[in-house]
Image (spheres, grey):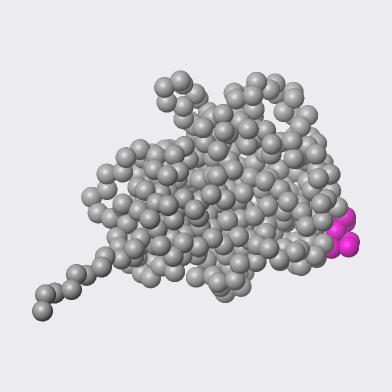
């Protein structure tokens, strides 16, 4: 488990020479592939190395199909470049969490559930490193690889529908579910009901926003406009992208104990002076450059009525701003986890 410190409020010192780092932001496929290759060889602080299950996987791009009765996001496989982006996102989490896959103080859980598992990277790696755990990953789409550890399996399921598991879990995990949850209180209640006493529930996400310690994020006007409209369109769709700050309170409301929220500053370009944060900024800069079309095309056209030309103009401005390392922009990676209270044993009559 990562250290208990919560560095989300510590100011980040900018690199005086950071303008030269704009060369890292050439947003083409060759650069993304190059950065990903270096990520796959990265040595984490605790001596563990990232194991890639990249080959043979499908990745997702958001193409919503909406009906009045049951609006859902329909996901379809995307190309190799988008697979590289997912590898970068997984790498970013492991860097910030110092190579760990989780933050909750879990102890040898026998049954583990991964909500919205996607391509199954987290579930596969957790199962591989914990062979005594039985890991189930669920998702709306069957895009997980077939070659997995024997203690890992994937199921097609919607975590927003009523759960019908025959046995409870010791640990329930979800990552990057911001913008995918319609009823948070129901989700947290179902997680509580499907945990063993003393079991843990954990959600982690990269916030869909931007900040700075010196106000320079206010100059990134296209980026700020895109964030504003992503928040607006996601609320219209019914799956809010601003919900993560409420997760701690909602978890407590559902009945979880020992609830904790850890936040980490995540640079959105390689502007920091600190070498590790600069490297994180390089990776996340590319992560965003590749992700912004996915986040904007579907929501803006379907929810706000934008044309493709209008979106392309906004994206061009965002790319320019993210390459300008005089904008000391960062977001926050948020991890919230809580424990189901244990069963109190009644005292025997004397």
What is the magenta range? 15-23
Question: Does 102 appear above or below 61?
Answer: below
Kindly identify the residue that appears in the image at 80 percent across and 39 percent down. Answer: 221
The quadrant in which residue 123 appears is bottom left
Instruction: Specify whether residue 149 is in view.
Output: no
Q: How many marks?
A: 0
Give coordinates of residue 249: x percent, y percent.
Answer: 49, 53
Quadrant (top left/top right/bottom left/bottom right) for the C terminus: bottom left
Q: Position of residue 68 (x, y in %)?
A: 46, 20
* Residue positioned 67% across, 42% down in the render: 290
Determine which quarter of the picture holds residue 14.
Answer: bottom right
Answer above or below: position of 42 versus 31: below
Q: Residue furthest bottom?
A: 350
91 shown above or below 224: below
Residue that protrudes farthest toward the front in the picture: 350
Could you say where residue 83 lies in the image, as x and y percent from the top left? 58, 45
Which of the 4 image quadrants contains residue 155? top left
Going 32% across and 57% down the picture, which residue do you hit? 195
x and y percent of residue 279 in the render?
72, 61
**Magenta residues, dominant SS class:** helix
Residue 247 seen = yes
Q: Residue at horizontal 60%, vertical 60%?
A: 263
Left or right relative to 286: residue 135: left
Magenta span includes 75:
no
Going by the image, does 344 lie left or right of 5?
A: left
Residue 184 vertical placement versus 87 (above, below):
above
């Amino acid at each position: 488990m990562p250290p208990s410190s919560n560095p989300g409020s510590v100011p980040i010192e900018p690199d005086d020479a950071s303008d030269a780092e704009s060369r890292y932001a050439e947003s083409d496929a060759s650069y993304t592939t190059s950065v990903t290759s270096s990520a796959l060889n990265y040595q984490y602080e605790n001596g563990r190395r990232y194991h890639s299950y990249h080959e043979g996987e499908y990745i997702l791009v958001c193409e919503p199909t909406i009906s009045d009765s049951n609006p859902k996001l329909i996901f379809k496989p995307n190309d190799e470049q988008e697979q590289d982006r997912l590898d970068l996102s997984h790498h970013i989490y492991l860097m910030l969490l110092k190579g760990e896959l989780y933050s909750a103080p879990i102890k040898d859980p026998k049954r583990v559930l991964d909500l919205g598992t996607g391509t199954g990277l987290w579930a596969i790696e957790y199962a591989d490193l914990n062979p005594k755990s039985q890991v189930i990953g669920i998702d709306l789409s069957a895009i997980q690889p077939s070659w997995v550890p024997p203690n890992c399996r994937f199921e097609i399921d919607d975590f927003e529908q009523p759960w019908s598991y025959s046995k409870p879990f010791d640990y329930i995990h979800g990552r990057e579910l911001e913008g995918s949850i319609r009823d948070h209180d129901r989700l947290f209640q179902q997680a509580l009901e499907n945990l063993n006493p003393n079991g843990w529930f954990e959600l982690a996400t990269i916030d869909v926003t931007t900040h700075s310690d010196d106000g320079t994020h206010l100059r990134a006007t296209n980026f700020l406009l895109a964030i504003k409209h992503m928040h607006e369109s996601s609320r219209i769709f019914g799956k809010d992208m601003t919900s993560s700050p409420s997760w701690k309170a909602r978890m407590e409301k559902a009945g979880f104990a020992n609830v904790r929220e850890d936040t980490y500053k995540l640079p959105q370009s390689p502007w920091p002076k600190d070498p590790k944060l600069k490297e994180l900024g390089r990776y996340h800069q590319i992560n965003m450059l590749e992700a912004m079309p996915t986040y904007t095309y579907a929501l803006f056209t379907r929810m706000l009525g934008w044309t493709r030309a209008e979106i392309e103009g906004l994206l061009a401005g965002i790319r320019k701003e993210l390459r300008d390392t005089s904008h000391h922009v960062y977001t926050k990676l948020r991890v919230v986890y809580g424990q189901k209270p244990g069963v109190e044993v009644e005292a025997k009559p004397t």
